[in-house]
């Protein structure tokens, strides 16, 4: 497959995916080496990000996968178009709970409740229903939660490393678990 065809095929696939796709998965679907796909994706990302010719979309790598998103340059326009008249904001309780999960994951509901000092069962169900947190394992019969790719996408982050440094202000989970005994 020549470079132009590869770029076109990548664009076509990336226009229809609803979550980021790893380069290896794209390479397998297009039957080309991963290195070629990596190069083409990087080239497309850079081309779309040209400040001299701003586009309404951009190619981003999020959580190890690639996807086309609307451009951050036009976020206010897209926001007005999509959100006008809607109020799908998270409550203060949901934001606080989401922050604890983001900074202390993997974490159980009980641990989050102890950090917040209130029962978070219904808030966790809301966050899971909105796709912002997900089950990531189990610890002694308790479900462990972490943030999802959807969380990263909505926050405009490519990984959890992009979170601002807040963790030093949160108590250690070992201290919390010790208090509950």
Image (cartoon, rainbow, N blue to C red):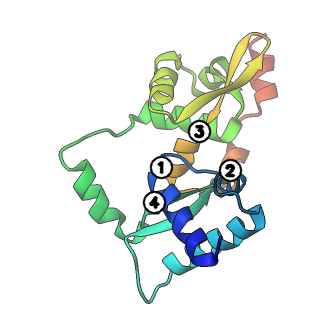
- x and y, in percent, of residue 66 in the image: 60, 57
Which dot, 3 or 2, sits closer to the camera?
A: 2
Q: Is residue 138 above or below residue 130?
A: above
| Numbered label attached to residue 154 | 1
Per the model, the C-alpha gap separating discs 1 and 3 is 10 Å
Per the model, the C-alpha gap separating discs 3 and 4 is 17 Å
- x and y, in percent, of residue 120 in the image: 52, 20
SS at mark 2 in the image: helix
Query: For mark 2, what is the residue?
Result: 25
Residue drawn at x 58%, y 56% is 157
Q: Are the two marked residues, 4 and 2, in contact with CB atoms closer than 8 angstroms?
A: no
Q: Are the two marked residues, 1 and 4, in contact with CB atoms closer than 8 angstroms?
A: no
Dot 1 or dot 3: first in sequence order is 3
Query: For mark 4, what is the residue?
Result: 69
Front one among 143 and 7:
7
Residue drawn at x 65%, y 55% is 26
Q: Badge 4, how many Cα within 10 Å: few under 14, some, many 20+?
A: some
For residue 82, side relative to residue 178 (left or right): left
Dot 1 or dot 4: first in sequence order is 4
């Amino acid at each position: 497959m020549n470079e132009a065809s590869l770029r076109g095929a990548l664009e076509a696939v990336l226009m229809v995916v609803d979550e980021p796709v790893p380069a290896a998965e794209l390479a397998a679907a297009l039957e080309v080496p991963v290195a070629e796909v990596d190069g083409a994706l990087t080239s497309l990302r850079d081309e779309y990000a040209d400040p001299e010719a701003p586009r309404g979309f951009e190619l981003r790598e999020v959580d190890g996968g690639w996807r086309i998103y609307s451009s951050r340059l036009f976020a206010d326009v897209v926001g007005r178009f999509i959100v006008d008249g809607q109020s799908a904001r998270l409550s203060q309780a949901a934001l606080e709970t989401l922050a604890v999960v983001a900074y202390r994951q993997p974490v159980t509901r009980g641990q989050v409740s102890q950090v917040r000092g209130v029962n978070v069962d219904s808030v966790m169900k809301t966050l899971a229903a909105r796709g912002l947190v997900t089950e990531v394992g189990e610890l002694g019969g308790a479900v462990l939660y972490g943030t999802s790719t959807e969380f990263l996408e909505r926050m405009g982050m490519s990984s959890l490393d992009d979170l601002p440094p807040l963790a030093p202000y949160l108590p250690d989970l070992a201290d919390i678990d010790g208090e509950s005994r």
